[in-house]
Image (spheres, rainbow, N blue to C red):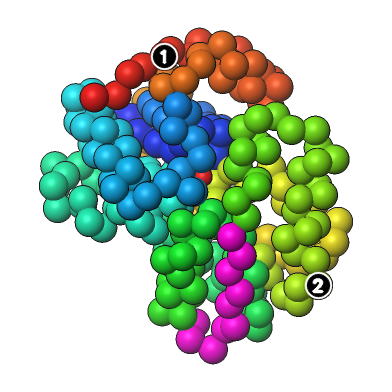
Amino acid sequence: MKTIGLCDSGIGGLLVLFALHKAYPKLNMTFLADQSHVPYGDKTHEQLKGYAVDLFDEFRRRNIQDVVIACNTLCANVLEEVRNDYSDLNLIGIIAPTVAQLRQIRAQKVLVLATKKTVEKHAYRKAIHEMMPEVIVEEIACPKLVPLIEGHADPKELRQAVYEYIEGKEFDACILGCTHFPLISEYIHEQKQVPIFDSNQAVIDLLKDEKIEGEGKIEIFTTHDAQTMQQVIQRLFGETIQVQEISLK
Ligand code: DGL
């Protein structure tokens, strides 16, 4: 595998990208961040489908075949619907691989935090029950979190929002069903010391048998503001990377 594509509405995809970069420093990656439409979690089905088509068309134009859909909302809502139109691409969903990590433990009650659109589809409950029918699953839509994360909210505000969502909940494992949410896992841990699973490790595991042949080249495009994205990368990962603005369509 030489180059892999990644797409998301924004910072969530960056988290997946840098987790992969750490695990596979030689992997070439091209990330498309559709920040002009963030948050995806409150959009209509038709809108999400349009965003997915624009992103996948762009990968096709760039001749990138292996594409990780680093966005649970797109995976839950539109990936299977458009998959047949992109049989030339290897579109890699992240929900089943994220759920597969639960096999490492014996959970009885799993809390899933995700966007409104992912929860409405019960994508995680279905995927968990396919693998482990006996597990109790509670899915919580957290519409405040992505806008706070993308808006670089004060950590106190973010922590407060997380506390409100999980207050009074009983669970012995937690799945972060949105790729933006690794940035809130510390706040969950402050309330409950349970195993927390995210899509970063899931994607790393997916590639573990691949022969990685690149030279670690990273390309990042955003449909919104490249300079802000560069600052976020600097702040979160201490890396200076040139981000380019792109218009899809
Ligand atoms: N990070 C994406 C997800 O995993 C999208 C979040 C959003 O834009 O609402 O669902």
Q: CA distance from mark 1 to mark 2?
A: 43 Å
Looking at the rendered image, the quarter that the C terminus falls into is top left
Q: Residue at x 68, y 60 (%)?
A: 196
The magenta span reads 132-141
Q: Secondary structure at mark 2?
A: loop
Q: Report the disc number at residue 100.
A: none
Q: Residue at x 19, y 25 (%)?
A: 61
Question: Residue 177 is drawn in which quadrant?
Answer: bottom right
Could you tell me the amino acid type at mark 2?
A: Gly
Name the residue: 66% across, 37% down: 149
Task: Tell me which corner region of the image, top left, top right, bottom left or bottom right, holds residue 23.
Answer: top right
Answer whether residue 213 is visible to the viewer in this image: no
Q: Amino acid at mark 1?
A: Glu
Question: Magenta span has 140?
Answer: yes
> Can you give x and y, in whole percent of width and height, for residue 17 in the image?
50, 34
Whether residues under marks 1 and 2 lie with C-beta atoms below 8 angstroms apart, the answer is no
* Magenta-drawn stretch, dominant element (helix, strand or loop): strand
Q: For marks 1 and 2, give the one nearer the viewer.
A: 2
| Residue labelled with disc 1 | 245
Say which residue label 2 marks. Answer: 168
Is residue 163 or residue 104 the one in the foreground?
Answer: 163
